[in-house]
Image (cartoon, rainbow, N blue to C red):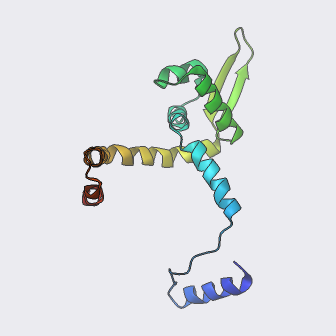
Amino acid sequence: MDARARRKAAQKCDQGYIDVTETPQHQTSDCLKVSRVLSRIGDKWSVLVIMLLRAQPRRFSELKRGIDGISQRMLSLTLRNLERDGLVSRKVTPSIPPRVDYALTGLGRSLAEPVEALGAWAFAHMAQIDAAQARYDAGRPEDVAPALAEG
């Protein structure tokens, strides 16, 4: 947004209204960056790791036991990616065998709350989603939208 557009928007705010039909300018490169972050933090393994780590740091084996169905390779890859993104820290304690603890960073803790809210939303609407999927699978997708709007 250039300086002229910002002044115009500020005048509208001062006058008590905002034209919601005007779409803000955005950069495609910014959308791509956000998309990459959302795809990482939105995958099921990352969400489960974040939820397990929100209470306390855990060892690799604790995480593996706490996440049903995750392979050792997938857990390693997920933790590495979360660490790269600054969401998880890894602490190695010299011992035999070496002890490795994973914990949420401040950034990771700030993500745990919205992830938990999303999970709560999913649980609260599970019956409606299941019903919509059943109707869709039965060949009546036109009934899906009204059923979701009811809740």
**In which quadrant is the C terminus drawn?**
bottom left
- The extreme top residue here reads 96
The quadrant holding residue 142 is bottom left
**In which quadrant is the N terminus drawn?**
bottom right
Q: Left or right? Give the position of 48 relative to 129.
A: right
The quadrant holding residue 81 is top right
- Residue 46: give x, y in percent of width and height: 56, 37
- Residue 109: give x, y in percent of width and height: 58, 43
Between residues 93 and 124, which one lies in front from this camera angle?
124
Q: Left or right? Give the position of 147 relative to 5.
A: left
* Residue at point 60%, 89% (across, down): 11
* Residue at point 48%, 26% (across, down): 67
The quadrant holding residue 32 is bottom right
- Residue 149 visible in the current orientation: yes
User: Quick check: 87 above or below 92?
Assistant: below
Between residues 27 and 133, which one lies in front from this camera angle?
133
Q: Left or right? Give the position of 123 relative to 16.
A: left
Between residues 113 and 44, which one lies in front from this camera angle?
44
- Residue 19: give x, y in percent of width and height: 51, 84
* Residue at point 69%, 41% (across, down): 86
- Residue 109 visible in the current orientation: no
Q: Left or right? Give the position of 15 relative to 107.
A: left
- The extreme front residue here reads 139
